[in-house]
Structure formats: structure tokens, C-alpha cells
Image: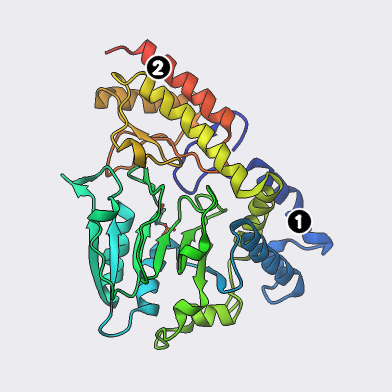
Amino acid sequence: MSKNVVNFNAGPATLPRPALERAQAELLDFAGTGISVLEHSHRGKDYEALHDHTISLLRKLMGIGDDYHVLFMQGGATAQFALLPMNVLRPGESADYVVTGSWSKKALSEGKPYGTLRVAATTEEGGSFKRIPKQDEIDLDANARYVHITTNNTIMGTQWHWLPETGDVPLVADMSSDILSTPIDVSKFDLIYAGAQKNIGPAGVTIVIVKKSFLDGANTNVAKVFQYAEVAKANSLLNTIPTFGVYLVRNVLEYLDERGGVPAMAEHNRSKAALLYDAIDENSTYFACPVAKEDRSLMNPVFRLPTEELEAKMIAEATEAGFIGIKGHRSVGGLRVSMYNAMTLEGVQRFVDWMKEFARANPV
Ligand SMILES: *Cc1c(COP(=O)(O)O)cnc(C)c1O
């Protein structure tokens, strides 16, 4: 993000400026080797040291135990929608999905060719998703192979602020848009996946954190490059990996670590979200947040204005003022202000001031 632009894009999203500056400074000569990280063999010791360090940073930041594999894969979260059931659902087994938005719906539809997937709960009421279900609305099958949730609904602007009780059934989560944003107890999950391009780094790297025991008895009739156990066995170096993507993930993780890690990010994220939601709630005849208050996302606040004309005007004028990416997803309309870890408090403060001014200048 350059100094004059505040980038609220939903993903790929803004990255910490120091992580980008470091990449710029190191681009031509990686770690004193005289060549760019882009030019290193993924099998060489210099890349390997970076690779292992990046994995250990993620383990440290998230408190991932030795009973978990940390994998780098490709294909984004979308590939995981299929790879998850492909790997772990055996003939006759089924899995439960809690459907809270467009991405969980897609996880369900992309996974269906690989097994029986049940909808344990959905909050698609009247065609839109405005909340997270309550525990007693979730109809869990005690024999399910896993329960899938989407921890932050990037498009809908809702987020799980608690975890469902699933008994002995393994919990699996798509954390693409809130991984590393707030402390989580990894041991509560058997598998976590996330595309990097929202909170971790650039597009092209997908993180998979999987409990080793979750892969016991997993399917082996899966091509190796798509098989969690094989990718783990090869330390995610089964084939050529997006090395530069991993390098940028390293820069972002080191930056987070220096800034106090995930607890510091959580505080930072709460402060930013409070600024924006307070501005909305203080002028509730003008701004309206369409989702349940207790389920509001700290990462992707969404809101509406009194008319679609005003929304279009606000988006156009915001862009001119240097606030980019505030148009809501095409499927829901309205506005969306994505504020992942890398978004600065100052960026949100500037936008909130501008937004209040817009409301004053454009009364209804
Ligand atoms: C962006 C996003 C996806 C899709 O990610 P790709 O990397 O494009 O496949 C899936 N789930 C969630 C929650 C997302 O935010």
C-alpha cells in the first residue's frame, strides 16, 4: 500500500508495507547468495532454510503442536473444498457442513462429487446470510467424518466469535479471511485451511494445518500432489512450490512476530473494527449494517446507505479520495471495508472521518 492510497480490497489484499519494502530490498540478492530468491532451486539449501523457517514461524505464531502437519499447497481455498473430502471421506461416510455464506456454500458444492455432504445448518434465510447459527440450530450427525465451518464470511460480513461443540466429530475450518487475526486454539481443530492472499501473503500459497491423526485411514487412491499425507511426507516439496510466495509469507510472518504476534493483531483488529462500526451505529439512519450485531466480522465489515444511488456515489468518490476496494461483493451489493491485519488504524481512521463527511455532504 503506498502512502496516498488506503487499500480495502477483499483479496488479494493490502500487505504490511515493511514486508513489501523488505522484498524490494532483497529482490536481487537473497540472503547474500548473489541471486534472487526467485532464481533459487526449491531443492537448494538456501530455499529450504527459508521454507523451514516460514513453517516454524507459523507454528510459533499460531501455537501449532507437533501433532499437526503444516503444509503449503496450491489451488487456493477453492481446491481445498474438493481435496478435503477427496482425502478423508471413505465410502459410506458423510460429513456435516454449516453453511453461513457464499464460500461455505461453495465448499459444499465443490465437495459433493467426493462423498455425502450434509447441511447441518444454514443461515441462508430469505436468500441472504445475515448471521451465524446458534449451537442448538446445528443438527450434527454424531457419525460424521468431520464438521466444516467457515470462520469468517468474507462476502457476508459475519464471523464466528465462538466455536461449535461437535463432540467427538473433528472440526474443520476454512480460515481464509481471518487466520492469524485473533488467537485460536488450534487443538480444537483437526484441519484448518486458508488461501494466503487475505491475511498471510500473496495469492498462490495455501496453508493447510492438519492433525496427523485425522489422516489415519485417509484415502490413498488420490494423486500424490493432492494427498495431504504425501505432501506432508515431502515437507510440501513434492513438486516445485511457489517459492516467492513462501518468501513473502515469511516476510509477513516475521513482521507479525516483531509486532507482538497474534494477540497484538487481535487488539489492533478490534480497535479498527470499533472505529468503523461505531461510525455506522452513531448514524444509524444513514448507515445500516445488515448483519446480526453479535456476529459482525472484524475483518470485513459490510454496510448499506439509504439508496443504491448514494452507495454508487460513495464508492466513486471514495475511490477518487484514495480509498479503494470498498464496493461490496457483486452478489450482495452495498459496501464492504476489508481490514485484515495489514490495514493500519490510521487508514481506517482516515476513512471513517471521510465517511462521516460524506454523510454530512449528502443528506437524504
Ligand atoms: C477468498 C476466500 C475463498 C476463496 O479463496 P481462493 O484462494 O480464491 O480459492 C474461500 N473461502 C473464504 C472464506 C475466502 O475468503
Give the quarter of the image for residue 288.
top left
Against 116, residue 202 (above or below) is above
* Three-letter amino acid code at the position of disc 1: Leu
Mark 2 CB near ligand 1 (8 Å cut): no
Residue 2 in the image: x percent, y percent? 61, 35
Q: Residues within 10 Å of mark 1 (few under 14, many from 20)?
A: some
Q: Secondary structure at mark 2?
A: helix
Disc number for residue 358: 2
**39 and 302: which is toward the camera:** 302
> Is 354 left or right of 241, judged from the image as shown?
left
Name which of mark 1 and mark 2 comes first in the sequence. Answer: 1
Residue 255 in the image: x percent, y percent? 68, 48
Numbered marks: total: 2
Against 93, residue 289 (above or below) is above
Mark 1 CB near ligand 1 (8 Å cut): no
Quadrant of the drawing holding the N terminus: top right
Q: Which residue is mark 1?
A: 28
What's the distance in space between the residues labelled 1 and 2, CA to CA?
45 Å
Going 44% across and 84% down the picture, which residue do you hit?
Answer: 223
Ligand 1 sits in which quadrant? bottom left
Residue 23 in the image: x percent, y percent? 70, 51
Residue 335 in the image: x percent, y percent? 35, 33
> Is 52 left or right of 150, judged from the image as shown?
right
**Coloring scheme used:** rainbow
Quadrant of the drawing holding the C terminus: top left
Disc number for residue 252: none
State if disc 2 and disc 1 touch (CB < 8 Å).
Answer: no
Give the quarter of the image for residue 108.
bottom left
Going 37% across and 71% down the picture, which residue do you hit?
Answer: 168
Q: Secondary structure at mark 1?
A: loop
